[in-house]
Amino acid sequence: MVTRREFLQGAAGSSIGDQLSGVTRANLKDSIGLETLTSLILSGFSSPGDRGAGALYVRGNKDGPLAVRDASGNWWNLAPASNEVWAGWFGVLGNADDTIALQLAIDYVAQSPEGGTVRVAAGRYNIAARSGYTDIGAHDDGVLGHDEARRLAPEPIDRQAFAICLRDKVRLVGEFGTVFQGSYTFGAASADEIACLATHASPVVQDIGIEQITFRNYFFAFAAPATNLLFAKFTSLRFEDCAIGIYSRGFERCYLDALSAQGTGCVVAIGGQWCSRSDEYNEGGGFSDKTYFGVIHNIYQRVMGEAEAAIDQYFDRVFYKTQNETMRLGPPARGRSIVRSFRYLGLCGRAVYLMSRYGRPNNANTFRLISHAYAHRAALWIEAAIACTAEVIYLERCGYQDNVRRTGPIGVSFVDPFLGPKVRIPAFVKGANCQIDAQQVVCDKLAIGNEFTGRFTYASDVAFPNNFHSIKDNLIANSLSTWSEPAGSYGLTLVSFELEPNSSVELEEKLGRIAGPRAAAVIFASVRQGSEAAIYLVSFDRNPARAGQSALLGGTDLLHFVKGERGQILVRSRMPEKRMIASIWAH
């Protein structure tokens, strides 16, 4: 990383501009004797040596960036030598509210198709002015399929206040010791409470980054309430006394590492948005895919009470909208409700909460280390998890005895409205295989599998035309169907393997033990270096009469399922001269 001092030393020693002692942007308008210069490096923004020092200005015009006119009538414009700028060049100095000036810096680099980096010098900055309101994506259009008789008026669009809009391909990078200060009081919850940084009016934002900044006293430190983030990077961030650290409707191949929080309701929350009256699979409810969560340290250290309840209820009322399940939700599209099967469990007291409002799975997320201390709720809670893994979860003084000031038994000083009175937290980890180290925790058990109270699993919603080709693995498991596996099962398993020509494979050997009295698998098969593909549903029912039954859901019939001598289920290729690739999604 380039420090501010190194940057200024490099600029001062370069030949791209003349550095005049005492010339700042503030007094450039009064400067004379600049007629022979075509470029100059300012010694400050308001005064020599302040955080605006080092800005390169060139002869320009009144319509150029940060235009300023000298005493001789010549126009000068900011002209950085690269797509990396310092916020101080735009007036982010730390001596007043810096909201407007920081937005100028972000908007400047956002003009470039390649984006750029805004660096912020070490120091404390007030970023607390309300600049506008960004849409929250959690609303439906009133439509219920093709049933015009049951159409309702569209829901109004809720909006959340924000200070700074972070745009595509812009990185905001602080020096060590950079602090953004807000004015939020923990427990306040309304549309007027400010998100320090937010996305605005974009369904997808990519390649943004926030690095090495401490956020104090914000409702959201960062919010993307109607946006899916692609390739976003959040590193070396600290959240103090915020309601939510990072929130987005969706993550796709993002990177988070070195996050820490104290007194913050939830460090990272994804998804959980009402978006349709139809009770069926819908990606609009939010998801997290293929995202890396590195080290996350969370010390909550608050006594749960009215403040937490206000934040939890606001998110439910505006984002999750549990009340809509009785007021606006239509009948289940597949015989069993998807939407009602995912319960909102409250935000505060959590480290990471990946929600699946409409059954969209959270796929292939990786967690390195989560430490969770003095907190009432779960460290890692993943709904509809597929192939999510965590190396280590560390728990310390968690559960109903999460604070030294809590002396009564369970449910005396605080009743969790989402669990009920005198009920211990069910677990601290859900949806990820991991190692857990726990000290002084109160719960029913440390971890549970990917349980579903509605007893369902994933199936394909891909429609295959007769002439389809190039079907990829990631098209499978995009929706939900009814399922007979009892609640409390071990979740979904993904196994991929190759099927050699003229060979057979024992499916249960590939999958290991399949729990429950009845089970089944969705199998995707394709020809290596070919266009043929197929999807099957295969029964592993413990009743021998039904075990091994299969159904071709779509595509070309490539596989043949038979029973072996011991009753095992074998799969063989119907095209013995070709090598197959198969993936099994099993419950």
Image: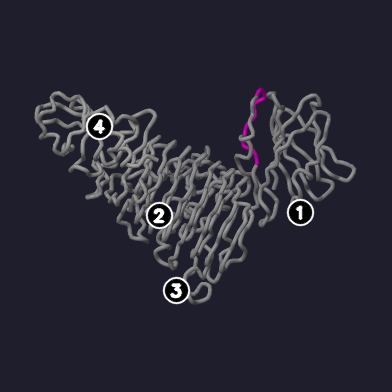
* Horizontal arrangement in the rendering, residue 518 relative to residue 444 (left or right): right
Mark with earlier residue (4, 3): 4
* Horizontal arrangement in the rendering, residue 228 relative to residue 573 (left or right): left
Contact between marks 2 and 1 (CB within 8 A): the answer is: no
Mark with earlier residue (2, 4): 4
- Which of the two marks, 2 or 4, is nearer to us in this view? 4
> Which mark identifies residue 56?
4
Determine the residue positioned at 68% across, 48% down.
Answer: 483
Q: x and y percent of residue 451 in the render?
A: 63, 54
Mark with earlier residue (2, 1): 2
Q: Where are the magenta residues, as a range?
A: 459-468
Which residue lies under the disc numbered 3?
405
Mark with earlier residue (1, 4): 4
> Which mark identifies residue 239?
2
Above or below, 532 against 20 in this view is above
Which residue lies under the disc numbered 1?
517
The kind of residue on which mark 3 rests is: Arg
User: Which quadrant holds residue 536?
Assistant: top right
* Horizontal arrangement in the rendering, residue 501 relative to residue 76 (left or right): right
Q: Tell me how far mark 2 sits from mark 1, CA to CA.
A: 46 Å
Q: Is residue 460 magenta-colored?
A: yes
Q: x and y percent of residue 140 in the render?
A: 45, 43
